[in-house]
Image (spheres, rainbow, N blue to C red):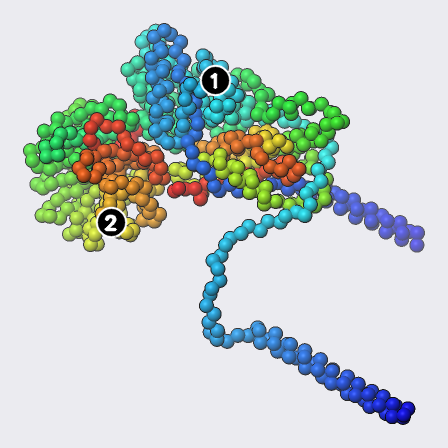
Amino acid sequence: MSQSRNQRRTSLSAATLAGDRRSRLGLFGSAALHAAVIAATLFTWQHSLQIADESPPVVPVDLVTIGEKTNIAPVAPKEDFTPKDETPVTAPTVDQTTPPPVQMAAPDVEEAPPPETAPSERLPKSVPPPVVPKQRPRPAPDQTKQKFDVNNILALLNKQQPAASNARGKTGARPHAGIGDQNAMTMDLVDALRNQIAQCWSPPVGAPHPEDLIVAFELFLNPDGSVAQPPQLAAQSRAAAAASPYVRAAAEAARRAIYTCAPYKLPADRYSQWRDITLVFDPRKMVGQ
Amino acid sequence: MIERDSMRRLSFTIAAAVLMVLGAIAPAAAQLHVDVTQGTIQPMPIAIPDFVAPGPGDGTPAANIAGVIRADLERSGLFRPLDPKSFIEQIHDINTPPQFNSWRVISAQGLVTGQAAIQPDGRLRVDFRLWDVYGESQMLGLQYFTTPENWRRIAHMISDAIYQRITGEKGYFDTRIVFISETGPALNRKKRLAVMDEDGANPTFLTNGSYMVLTPRFNPTAQMIAYMSYIGGKPRVYLFDLETGRQQMLGNFPNMTFSPRFSPDGNKVVMSLEHGGNSDIYVMDLRTRSVIRLTQDPGIDTSPCYSPDGTQIAFESDRGGSQQVYVMNADGSNPHRISFGTGRAGTPVWSPRGDLLAFTKIDAGAFRIGVMHPDGSGERVITDGWQDEGPTWAPNGRVLMFTRTLKNGRGSQIWSVDVTGRNERRVVTPGDASDPAWSPLIQ
């Protein structure tokens, strides 16, 4: 009985051995076959298969990374804030100087102020100092909250951040990293803004060379969606606007759209994501409509 | 061992410090980037209160000027003058800035304040300022002196200045239209050469209607009109001097001359000359009166028009079998067809801006106005009447006028349309009118 068991074990072990040998063979065989299959996928015979192209039409989509978490409200040292009241864009001034009298012949009319360039460069040419120099289209409550108030830190930070970052060219008052993807640009915000601005923007459709009329603005918003400070034309657009009256008109139309649409309706809890916005107005698709 | 530990700690500290510095430099919060590619084409709301009248006799011109400016800007389709009844602030002094808030609440984006006063020397002095209501700044401020009768032109000039400042494009309100006025029954139609302001004011007849006139065209100074007339039963091209009222035949050709047009420098007239059923294009130098033949084709070549730089001429020809638009060099070389759309194409007119050619598109029995680039690309039809033909450009190349013939012999009218196809409207004329030609800005 025990012998027969031994025999069986021996035969078993022999079988196992044989199986081992076979499995190694099988392993190589399998690897070779796999390699052959992979190799076969790499080589094709030209025109061997003619599959009808029934793929649906290409639908262009924008791939946008969505942050899993919104950023924690950034913490910035409050002393970094330096309001830049000299921003001259909107200070209303009246050119009190009487333009040189123009003679009776109507065509001799001359423009009293010299040709203006960018809005911000216009003002120095006015002779008298601004009549109401500090008036800005910023909501009134902002002005009253300038004092440091422990209970009001957040409000202070929210409203002052844009001015600080703008005044310092994005170097000084940058907040620390919060939780979540710092570059998270959420498409719902972009869409919401785009839709709102589209209602207000009357693009320069009749002007020649619409491809030259693309203008970019940097815009800072208050938490209530109002415009925090006069929107700044991007440097490149500013140069173009100074050179061409068409670009200047396009830039002014875009700026009017920004103001007309305010206040913007955006989710207040994600203010940190839409506080600082670059708006690019591109009229090319509107031409001929 | 201890030394190694401290070394390791030091290197950790340095690494941490480097990381912190890097972290501080790296931009933390991303800017939201929004591309705005769609808008809503709508006229800009602008407030134009009646101009301030400082003296007792200044009230009428002050109100009239504002009224003409409002009408000009409204007609352009790019502005929406607001109802003066909605104004909250009354302007009494144009030298102080307005209260922008009270204009913002009525949704005005621009504000025009002005003043008109008769000076002690009898002249009319008009000042105006254009304000950016949202930007709270002055965009423009100008002053004009003129005789009081000229108030209408001053109003047009102010409209032009506002239009140019807002759109970047020169205006076209201080211009005139020459056209063919048609009166009387269909069988005994009187066709007279007439001229009027761009807004239809001051219409004047230049000829008395005893002979037929056709295709009038302004020269670049708007002082001379070239046209075709049947004086003495012979159809010939004539020149009319607006200043002196004199007219003269252009050259003495044995056969019919027609469809004249000035060169951009005003020194030449290009026209068609018919000879034995074949018409070709000729150019005459107005100073030397020398004539050069430009086309030699057996087909009908007509409706020539110079490009704004004077180097090319667009014309229509049936040399290829059907009426189409061709372009050749100003010396007649290299003629080539540019219109390849459906149907036929005729009466090409080069935009003063040079970027487009307007033409009459004849397709499926309908006449419409189309535009295309000088190479024939980008063809668009911009009107949809029963019979629209004979386009002429505003000096800024943004608006067109044309003749619209109504169905069932109900006459013909002059209409205007934006180059975009928007803002189609009838131009007010005394009675029926056709064949408009837009003058350049009056010098």
Of mark 1 and mark 2, the one earlier in the sequence is 1
> Would you identify the image quadrant in which residue B401 lies?
top left
> Would you identify the image quadrant in which residue A41 lies?
bottom right
Residue drawn at 24 percent across, 22 percent down = B202
In-image side of B295 versus B25 (left or right): left
In-image side of B53 versus B31 (left or right): left
Residue drawn at 69 percent across, 45 percent down = A69
Image mark for residue B364: 2
Measuring from the top left, give residue A83's x and y in whole percent: 65, 27
Check the residue under mark 2 and report the chain it is in: B
Q: Are marks 1 and 2 on the same chain?
A: yes
Measuring from the top left, give residue B276's x and y in whole percent: 9, 48
Residue that mark 1 sits on: B88
Image quarter of the C terminus of chain B = top left
Residue B382 visible to the viewer: yes
Q: Marks 1/2: CA distance? A: 54 Å
Measuring from the top left, give residue A213's x and y in whole percent: 46, 39
Q: Residue furthest right?
A: B2
- Give the number of marks: 2
Element marked by disc 2: loop
Q: Residue furthest front?
A: A1
Check the residue under mark 1 and report the chain it is in: B
Residue drawn at 71 percent across, 40 percent down = A72
In-image side of A212 versus B378 (left or right): right
Q: Is residue B180 above or below residue B330?
A: above
